[in-house]
Image: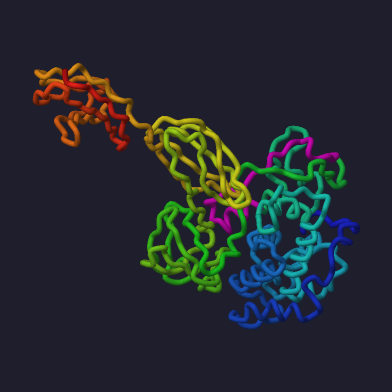
């Protein structure tokens, strides 16, 4: 935690021993990464060994590993506990080791210097304590797995000082030099490989009260934010059987968990099924902070490893009930509590909210047959679903056709009905003539002369198969 010291009052919210009962937790963390061998005294583990340590410690605390790794990168870009001579790294402001623990007397100072596992879990314990603070804002409805919900705890890890205000009070401009902004940049670049932008908070200068000439802590006037941008749950909680989609225009499905392995190109939105737990990069010295998931394509034709940076949870299309030109409501199903958006002929039309079971119903009024309605929804993370398009079905029968006077010498019958409907003339059950109406609904049908007193019946059937009421005419 470079630059700023934590206030003594803040320390009281931290519960020493969250991870540790002395050596027990240390051995637990080390055992989860035993594939890399034992951690040697005064030696830095390989990059992927540290990746494993940071990931597992974060998951134990239910913190997105993306957050922990980005904080570590900001504090210690090389992910090293010791310098080239095997001495513990201590910064000018007395920040210790990998997590740059500063002014934390409740921790064993020697272990902070010499035990990388202890240093990591102390840093995570402090970060977790910052999340529990009640004076820091949160995102409405978001939990610990949402990366954006760590914006203020990350700030507090460095210090809730004027220098870390999200906005410059005097101008209202975004404070790009704030500690948490730098950490979020690392998340975007290292955990998402630069292809994702984290959601933005709708900050106002009135949200923060502080004296820019003082070193006193910021007072947060607004404690809850609603974000309209998409927010991002951690990619480390996928389980076997989960469906994900590719987020890149082109991403490689590797034969092994390494960027140097051969691969098959996958296009954006390709559906993949998680086959097991994630793996770390095959090269122990690789600088990749993401992990690799074993996956297969939905058609089971391809299998391999995909970077966690290039996948997100698959969102299914909404289901939409059939609608015809007599209906006044549109109904269907989306995700629970999702915001459902409806476009009519590609223009914004209606919106509603699905209930706790995902069902929705919205009044749209009678729509003309052939009208195109496109339905999407936004889930709890403001991610937009694929589109489901339905066309309003024609269920309205044509108007009863008119029939011209028919005499026993008549050879041509005319009349009018719905445009392009097919007119059929019958005597009893026998068809004596049929023709399609023109664009004005007019028709002309040639018949053989009929006897006087014969009843001729006319019906019109439209292209949707709807049939009109019959019209009759008696031959004179």
Q: Can you give x and y, in whole percent of width and height, for residue 376 in the image?
A: 51, 43
Classify residue 377 by image quadrant. top right
Q: Can you give x and y, in whole percent of width and height, for residue 12 in the image?
A: 89, 61
Q: Can you give x and y, in whole percent of width and height, for residue 249 in the image?
A: 43, 51
Residue at (90% x, 59% y) in the render: 8
Quadrant in which the N terminus appears: bottom right
373 w.r.t. 22: above or below: above
201 falls in the magenta region: yes
469 w.r.t. 189: above or below: above
387 left or right, relative to 394:
right
Quadrant in which the C terminus appears: top left
How is the structure coloured here? rainbow
| Res. 199 visible in picture | yes
Is 51 or 91 nearer to us in this picture?
51
Classify residue 446 by image quadrant. top left
Is 291 or 446 nearer to us in this picture?
446
| Res. 287 visible in picture | no
Residue at (70% x, 50% y) in the render: 141
Q: Can you give x and y, in whole percent of width and height, for residue 153 in the image?
A: 75, 54
447 left or right, relative to 125:
left
Is 233 or 77 nearer to us in this picture?
233
Q: Bounds of the magenta span?
A: 184-212
Residue at (67% x, 51% y) in the render: 148
């Amino acid at each position: 935690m470079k630059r700023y010291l934590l206030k003594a009052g803040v320390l009281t919210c931290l519960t020493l021993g969250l991870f540790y009962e002395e050596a027990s937790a240390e051995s637990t963390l080390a055992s989860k990464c035993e594939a890399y061998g034992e951690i040697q005294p005064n030696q830095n583990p390989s990059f992927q060994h540290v990746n494993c340590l940071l990931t597992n410690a974060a998951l134990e605390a239910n913190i997105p590993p993306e957050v922990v790794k980005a904080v570590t990168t900001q504090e210690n870009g090389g992910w090293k506990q010791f310098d080239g001579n095997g001495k513990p790294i201590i910064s000018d402001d007395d920040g210790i080791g990998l997590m740059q623990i500063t002014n934390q007397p409740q921790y064993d100072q020697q272990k902070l210097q010499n035990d990388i596992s202890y240093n990591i879990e102390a840093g995570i314990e402090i970060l977790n304590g910052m999340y529990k603070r009640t004076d820091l804002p949160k995102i409405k409805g978001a939990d610990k797995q949402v990366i954006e919900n760590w914006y203020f705890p990350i700030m507090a890890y460095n210090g809730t000082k004027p220098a870390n205000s999200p906005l410059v009070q005097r101008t209202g401009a975004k404070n790009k030099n704030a500690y948490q902004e730098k950490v979020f940049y690392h998340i975007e670049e290292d955990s998402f490989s630069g292809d994702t932008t984290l959601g933005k908070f709708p900050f106002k200068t009135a949200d923060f009260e502080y004296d820019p000439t003082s070193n006193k802590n910021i007072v947060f006037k607004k404690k809850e934010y609603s974000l309209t941008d998409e927010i991002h749950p951690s990619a480390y909680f996928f389980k076997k059987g989960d469906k994900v989609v590719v987020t890149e225009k082109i991403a490689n499905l590797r034969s092994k968990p390494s960027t140097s392995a051969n691969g098959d190109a996958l296009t954006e939105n390709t559906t993949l099924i998680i086959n097991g737990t994630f793996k770390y990069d095959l090269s122990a010295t690789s600088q990749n902070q993401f992990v690799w998931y074993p996956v297969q394509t939905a058609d089971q034709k391809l299998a391999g490893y995909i970077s966690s940076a290039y996948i997100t949870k698959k969102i299914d299309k909404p289901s939409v009930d059939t609608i015809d030109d007599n209906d006044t409501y549109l109904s269907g199903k989306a995700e629970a509590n999702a915001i459902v958006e409806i476009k009519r002929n590609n223009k914004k039309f209606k919106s509603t909210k699905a209930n706790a079971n995902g069902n929705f119903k919205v009044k749209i009024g009678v729509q003309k047959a052939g009208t195109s309605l496109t339905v999407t929804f936004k889930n709890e993370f403001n991610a937009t679903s694929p589109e489901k398009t339905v066309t309003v079905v024609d269920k309205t029968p044509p108007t009863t056709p008119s029939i011209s006077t028919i005499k026993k010498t008549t050879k041509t019958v005319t009349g009018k009905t719905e445009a392009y409907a097919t007119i059929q003339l019958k005597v009893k059950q026998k068809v004596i003539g049929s023709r399609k109406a023109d664009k004005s609904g007019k028709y002309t049908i040639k018949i053989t002369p009929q006897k006087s007193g014969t009843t001729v019946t006319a019906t019109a059937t439209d292209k949707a198969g709807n049939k009109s009421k019959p019209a009759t005419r008696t031959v004179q």
